[in-house]
Amino acid sequence: MDRRILTDKIAGGGMAVIAIASLILVLGIAVGLYVKSEPVLSEHSLWKLLSTAEWKPMAGEFGFLPFIAGTFFITLLSVAIALPVSLLMAIFLTEYSNSGVRKWVYPLLDILAGLPSVLYGVWGTLVIVPWISEWLAPRLGMQSGGYSLLAGGLVLSVMIIPLMESLFIELFTGVGNEYREGSYALGATRWQTVKYVVLRRTAPGIIAAVVLAVSRALGETMAVMMVCGNLPIVPKKLLDACYPIPALIANNYGEMLSMPLYESALMFAALILFVLVLIFNLFARVTLRKLV
């Protein structure tokens, strides 16, 4: 057999093994979390665990509704803030700015993307939390300690902006100049070219970038944990405290290993987070298939 053909077959087989191993790893994580969650699932019905808000571990009450709501709201808020900012900045940098501006901005984005999450948490604690408690809340006629859903959403949005913007920039620069030149030749303005050519051609990639950002936001722990208040309540206002699932696991796991049912509840929280990320990614896949 020709050496090139043999090398090609070996490479293909190796990549197939890696792909199968990745699938097995995901399934293994899911099965492991479910097995660890079995004690709390045998004690309480799934509906009760997901729909009640009573969180009293010492009394055997494990209502995950506050944590699911906190995770959902803080993720939604952060993406709602970060998406327009990232999209408009990427459009400006790729379509309107000159090379001198890009020369300075691109390295700054790389630095922001590489900062540890604890630094964002410290920044949020020292800047965002006092701003909310001392300036924003009084002007709204409200009282707040600053540790709130809004603080967590702002900090998390700043964390995911570099990721989203870098992906958007890659997408927009990948659109060939012949498309832009053809649009200009037909009399379109620069904004019309961006709107009807660049954004349309990169729409699937934009959705994929948002999916990555949401997955990052869903799993973020340290920065959010430092500014969101960590109270097991369902937030009804932006200035209410919240308690996302990653913060719940990080705050409690390790200290509660002597309580099997509590440990099982925390593993069930991890399983909920796993399922949320899986459902969102499957939904995004379906949406991408319809767009492409």
Image: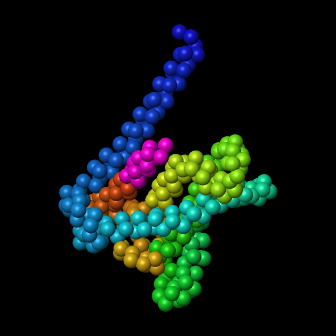
Comparing 179 with 121, the one in front is 179
Comparing 183 with 123, the one in front is 183
Q: Residue at x 57, y 85 (%)?
A: 135
Comparing 285 with 14, the one in front is 285
Residue at far top of view: 1
Side of 226 relative to 190 (left or right): left
* Whether residue 36 is situated above or below residue 265 in the rendered picture: above
Q: Position of residue 94 (x, y in %)?
A: 69, 53
Q: Residue at x 53, y 16 (%)?
A: 6
Q: Confirm whether residue 19 shows in the render.
A: yes
Which image quarter: residue 244?
A: bottom left
* Whether residue 6 is situated above or below residue 193 in the rendered picture: above
Side of 62 relative to 19 (left or right): left
The magenta segment is 277-292
Q: Residue at x 41, y 34 (%)?
A: 20
Q: Position of residue 249 (x, y in %)?
A: 40, 62
> Which secondary structure dominates the residues rendered in magenta?
helix
Which image quarter: residue 86?
A: bottom right
Comparing 95 with 192, the one in front is 192
Q: Position of residue 81 (x, y in %)?
A: 54, 67
Please count the marks in the image: 0
Side of 168 relative to 247 (left or right): right
Q: Position of residue 80 (x, y in %)?
A: 51, 65
Q: Residue at x 50, y 69 (%)?
A: 153
Q: Is residue 34 magenta?
A: no
Q: Is residue 286 magenta?
A: yes
Q: Confirm whether residue 259 shows in the render.
A: no
